[in-house]
Image (cartoon, rainbow, N blue to C red):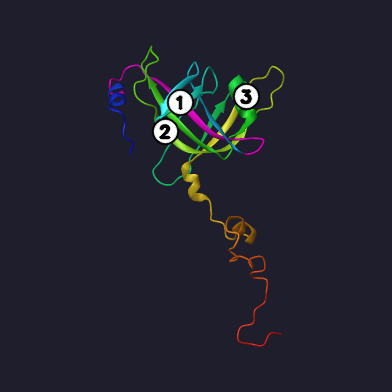
Amino acid sequence: MKSLDPALIAHLGARGQICSHVLVWFSAVQRLDGVTAAPWGVWTGDDDRTFTIDGSPRTYYGAGAMGPPGALSFEVGYVVRLHRLQLSHLHADVKAALASTEIRLRPVELHQVHLVPGSHDLVAAPLLRLRGAVESLSLPRLAIGGAGMAEVQVASSARDMTRPLEITKSDATLRAVYPGDGFRRYIAVSGTVKVAWGEENG
């Protein structure tokens, strides 16, 4: 069960005007060499803004960098939930980030933040709503003058529970980590060599 900040509980309990925004934070790698790149984020606010999350500042692109996020649905148990987000791939900062980094299969976090209505003040620190990974990224092919947004499909962290363990690993893979370990030296022919047990081979 999530614990809510008392200030947020009081704000929601007052049943007054609500000003809520969604923050999306992408981990990424460089497209050219696969090296870890600086993470980047977008949010539904009107301007770029920096929020402190887990003790570190994060700058999120605003001003139309993402579309309406829609509702997030959850249920009890290890169920993989898929959520779709829209990114403005023509937004200058988002366009540059997508061109230079790869976010597919990389971790992603979604937070929700409440602002004081008519102000930019925070009611409470951003609340984590989803932690998962980017399943896919689709960039639209638009006609001249057309409109559209990139679609990102995000899978919840329960996806990690559905990935099977590797059945076999090669001798080369093991020796790359432990050069002197020859435990898997016969794995390439394992199961292909006929072995006679207690009888004459022939």
Q: Are marks 1 and 2 in contact (CB under 8 Å)?
A: yes
* Front in this rendered view, residue 157 or 58: 58
Q: Which residues are magenta?
A: 12-34
| Position above or below: 86 against 106 | above
Q: Residue at x 64, y 30 (%)?
A: 100
Q: Whole-percent x and y of residue 187? A: 63, 66
Q: Residue at x 39, y 27 (%)?
A: 126
Assign a secondary structure to mark 3: helix
Quarter holding the C terminus is bottom right
Q: Which residue is mark 2?
A: 129
Mark-to-mark CA distance, 3 and 1:
20 Å
Q: Amino acid at mark 1?
A: Val
Mark-to-mark CA distance, 3 and 2:
26 Å
Q: Whole-percent x and y of residue 1? A: 33, 39
Q: Who comes first in sequence, dot 3 or dot 2?
A: 3
Callout 2: few (<14), some (14-19), or many (20+) C-alpha neighbours within 10 Å? some
Q: Which mark is residue 95?
A: 3
Q: Amino acid at mark 2?
A: Arg
Residue 151 sits in quarter:
top right
Q: Which residue is mark 1?
A: 22
Q: Whole-percent x and y of residue 46? A: 49, 16
Assign a secondary structure to mark 2: strand
Mark-to-mark CA distance, 1 and 2:
9 Å
Q: Whole-percent x and y of residue 97? A: 60, 27
Q: Who comes first in sequence, dot 3 or dot 1?
A: 1
Q: Amino acid at mark 3?
A: Lys
Residue 29 inside the magenta-drawn segment: yes
* Front in this rendered view, residue 177 or 188: 177
Q: Who comes first in sequence, dot 1 or dot 2?
A: 1
